[in-house]
Amino acid sequence: MDTDEPYDDLLPLLLEICEDFFTGTGPAVRHEVDALLQARDITGGPGWLIDMLALTRRRLEIPT
């Protein structure tokens, strides 16, 4: 990563890293993520989280 990169560009990168991580996790991690989401009354499961990460990243990439 370029140290001269503006901080605004880091959020899409962070979202992409999280999306990649959660996409490649095993059942134990998916279970933990699901428990964490349910504790916050989010019932969509890990798939929902991955979709929201991807959607948010893509929305940030669209010029306004």
Image: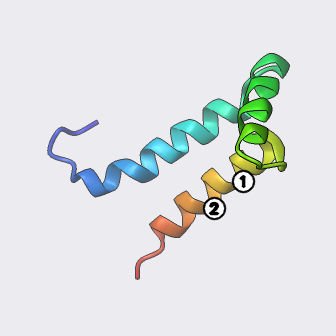
The amino acid sitting under disc 2 is Leu
Disc 1 crowd, CA 10 A, few/some/many (<14, 14-19, 20+): some
Q: Kindly check if marks 2 and 1 are in contact, taking CB atoms under 8 A apart as contact.
A: yes
Name the side, left or right, on which 10 lies relative to 3. Answer: right
**Judging from the image, what secondary structure is the residue with disc 1 in?**
helix
For the point 66% across and 55% down, the residue is 52
Report the residue marked by disc 2: 55
Q: Which mark is residue 7?
A: none
* Quarter of the image where the C terminus is located: bottom left
* Place of residue 5 in the rendered image (x, y in percent of width and height, measured from the top left): 21, 48
| Rendered image quadrant of residue 9 | bottom left
Say whether residue 25 is left or right of residue 5.
Answer: right
Residue 46 in the figure: left or right of residue 63: right
Rendered location of residue 6, percent (x, y): 21, 53
Q: Residue furthest left?
A: 4
Which amino acid lies under the numbered mark 1 shown in the image of this protein? Asp
Q: Where is residue 49 drawn, in percent x and y?
A: 70, 47
* Residue 59, x across and y down, in percent: 54, 69
Q: Is residue 10 above or below residue 30?
A: below
What scheme was used to colour the molecule?
rainbow
Q: Neighbour class for label 2 at 10 Å: few (<14), some, many (≥20)?
A: few
User: Which secondary structure, mark 2?
Assistant: helix
Query: What number is the disc on residue 51?
Result: 1
Extreme residue toward the top, this view: 28
Q: Give the camera-side residue of 53 and 5.
A: 53
Q: Residue at x 82, y 42 (%)?
A: 45
- Relative to residue 29, is residue 20 depicted above or below? below
Q: CA distance from mark 2 to mark 1?
A: 6 Å
